[in-house]
Image (spheres, rainbow, N blue to C red):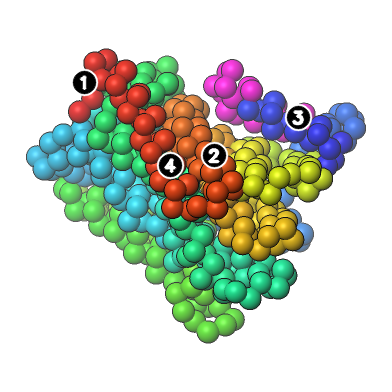
Amino acid sequence: MEGTIYSLIPPLLMLVLVIATRKVILSLAAGILVGAFMLTQLNIMEGIQTIWSVFASIFYSEGTLNTGNIYLLAFLLLLGVATAFMTASGSSRAFGKWAVNRITTRRGAKLVPVLLGIIIFIDDYFNALAVGQVARPVTDRHKISRAKLAYYIDSTSAPVTVISPISSWGAYIIGTIGSILAANEIADYQAFEAFVRMIPYNFYVFAALLLVFLTVFMKVDIGPMRTHEKRAVQTGELIDPDKKNDVPGDLNEEFQDHNHGKISHLVWPITVLIVGTVLSMVITGIRNSSESVNLLSIFANTNVNISLFIGGLLSVLLAVALYFKQPEPKSSMNHVFVEGIKAMLPAVYILLFAWMIGDIINQLGTGEYLVGFVNQASINVALLPFLFFIVAGFMALATGTSWGTFGIMLPIAGQVAAGIDVSIVLPALSAVLAGSVFGDHCSPISDTTILSSTGAGSNHIDHVLTQLPYAFMAAFAAGVGYLLLGFTGQLVWAFIITIIITAVIAAIVHFYLSKDYSAR
């Protein structure tokens, strides 16, 4: 069954169950079970052994510890602890009071995570978690649903990072492009120049970012997002009351914050988190660079996960020290620590299951099947950018990884395009990047999607389902743009049409929803 159409069964089953039941752990478990039994020809004992092997490989494989995974999981727990101590200190409440006096509208509160998401472009993991911690007190005060906050975080993290050359994504993509150009003997431009020239071809990114700003300034709350925003505005419930127990990052209701909190107890731990992480990324990037050290080589060779861990650890130590100095009465430090750990366990469980099904999907050869399908089909050259966008989107949706899709699809797109017409290499590569981000936005097993819901304190499936309509709106506009680009070769007009279609769709939604409820 490996490398055949049957390899699509586990990811498709998982996606159907997620939408039908809204229970992500159950859906992931079903996909894992079915995939494992497919790999072992329905042998139950071997299937169970395969599941255990996949789980164990998250922590230990090929004779060594998987420190990257361990550091990321530890960082999530540290983030929960830091958040707990910042909340217990009363700093979140104090910051909320301060922000209310300066940010007086919902529109202004919505702009906080959007602008932060664009500014913090170094890494999508860091963006997803840091923006949520900073913006949540402000958005909560202005009754912005957690699902909307998660959407803002997710739709500004990967889209900005994927077009930024000075980022972990940019460095990885530039390195991949360099090998593609060398393999296909393309000497017209170097890898960095190719990356920069590819930016305007990434139609999905610009459509998605435009939609983010349109939802800030207009009522574009469509589908499930409409329900969440109406409830937040009318009742003050930022999360579906029936799903509060499944929300990562939210603390137990018995947890009490301090009555005399200071904003500095929030600002300093977050500042240390940001500075500590960035400095660690720079230091590890310099240490791992075997070539001349520059910004590009630093971010190409940095260790993001250990940097997040170091930043998180420093943040926790400072948050604990500040809380220790506060006068009584206050919750015991042990209680705060335990509640912080418990708050992040849902995110840890989801991430573990997502890694497991990703491994099984990889063993089933789902990506290879999709690539072979593209290679074997007889395709009009004008359709290539559009088809690469669709295939990359479906691959990222099924596998939950943008980077994995980059690694598989970029070389294929480069080879196919160079063999047909070297002038379409950059559009083809850009379409792969765009499709990968689109699929990532739709996938419930995507790391970035999981971490965005974690950073926002949103129910994970609520985030996935509320973001889907916006992702498909942007993808539709981008798809039209790629078709126009393929048949006319006109980048400027294809880009403009993409933007116009996005704006028109948003305007239509705004018109029909404008009288529904007050969401300013």
Instruction: Tell me the distance, in whole angstroms, between the alpha carbons under discs 1 and 3.
Output: 43 Å
Upstream in sequence: badge 1 or badge 4 = 4
Residue that carries the numbered disc 1 in the rendered image = 518
Foreground mark, 3 or 4, reads 4
Q: Secondary structure at mark 4?
A: helix
Q: Identify residue type, mark 3.
A: Ile
Percent x, y of residue 363: 79, 45
Upstream in sequence: badge 1 or badge 3 = 3
Percent x, y of residue 39: 84, 37
- Quadrant assignment, res 317: bottom left
The magenta segment: 16-36
Can you tell which mark lies on residue 9? Answer: 3
Q: Identify residue type, mark 1.
A: Ser
Can you tell which mark lies on residue 479? Answer: 2
Residue that carries the numbered disc 4 in the rendered image = 497
Percent x, y of residue 122: 42, 60
Residue at position x 29%, y 21% from top?
Answer: 511
Q: Secondary structure at mark 2?
A: helix
Instruction: Tell me the distance, in whole angstroms, between the alpha carbons under discs 3 and 4.
Output: 36 Å
Upstream in sequence: badge 3 or badge 2 = 3
